[in-house]
Amino acid sequence: MDSLKYIREHMQKTIETKQKMLADEALLQRLADAAALCVEALKNGKKVMFAGNGGSAADSQHLAAEFVSRFNFDRPGLPSIALTTDTSMLTAIGNDYGFDKLFSRQVQANGVAGDVFVGISTSGNSVNIIKAVEQAQSMGIHTVAFCGTGGKLPSMCDITLNAPSDCTPYIQETHISFGHILCGIVEELMFAEFKPQ
């Protein structure tokens, strides 16, 4: 194996995926709309919930932490939770109700109308994310999908952010870009007065 060749090819594909994202004006507008949706919810005393499986679970925790702690500058914390962090909760729900209800049960218990639920699924077909979206919608919770180019999830949510790739690593890299941009816009719109000059 030629490691340097692998590195260059991977980086080139990463760049190509980001260039496709940058060239898609509709996608960029949906990302701006998702940020505006979060700002509206947060200004009304609501919260942003994240969920995903595997690497997408890690992304959920990462992004919730950016909301609660800080992203680019010091400011008050923003209410956000990742539904992927509590092992007792996850194993209780998984054992009693099944893996498919891991997140929908938590949305039902913790969500309120006007919240935002962000479901992250590289395939767009994660059943527990689909069920969480259905639960959220039944409660008047806004829904945002981070996904790839396929699956059922894109057509279900209020706002869909599709990574322009069908390859899991590049979808995941794009998802964290979506998340970082979302956090940055929300932080600036909520707390412009805290931004260092």
Image (spheres, helix red, strand yellow):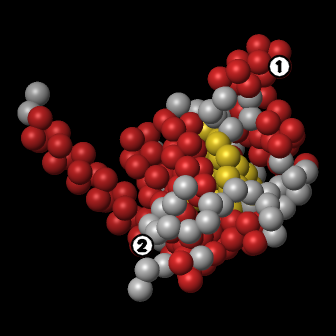
What residue is at 83 percent from the left and 55 percent from the top?
Answer: 141
**Left or right of 194 in this view: 78:** right
Can you see residue 121?
A: no
Q: Which comes sooner in the sequence, label 2 or label 1?
A: 2
Q: Amino acid at mark 1?
A: Tyr
Q: Residues within 10 Å of mark 2 (few under 14, many from 20)?
A: few
**Left or right of 139 in this view: 156:** left
Q: Which residue is mark 2?
A: 23
Secondary structure of the residue carrying numbered label 1: helix
Q: Residues within 10 Å of mark 1 (few under 14, many from 20)?
A: few
Indicate the quadrant containing the N terminus: top left, top right, bottom left or bottom right: top left
Can you see residue 9?
A: yes
**Left or right of 157 in this view: 162:** left
In percent of width and height, residue 125 lies at 64, 37
In percent of width and height, residue 108 lies at 87, 40
Residue depth check, mark 2 versus mark 1: number of the one nearer the observer: 1
Indicate the quadrant containing the C terminus: top left, top right, bottom left or bottom right: bottom left
Q: Which mark is residue 97?
A: 1
In the depicted view, which residue is nearer to us: 71 or 148? 71
Q: Amino acid at mark 2?
A: Ala
Distance between mark 2 and mark 1 Cα atoms:
43 Å
Q: Is residue 84 above or below residue 12?
A: above
Q: State the image quarter where residue 104 is shown.
A: top right
In percent of width and height, residue 130 lies at 74, 40
| The furthest residue to the top | 95
Q: State the image quarter where residue 92 is shown.
A: top right
What residue is at 44 percent from the left and 40 percent from the top?
Answer: 168
In the depicted view, which residue is nearer to us: 18 or 103? 103
Secondary structure of the residue carrying numbered label 2: helix
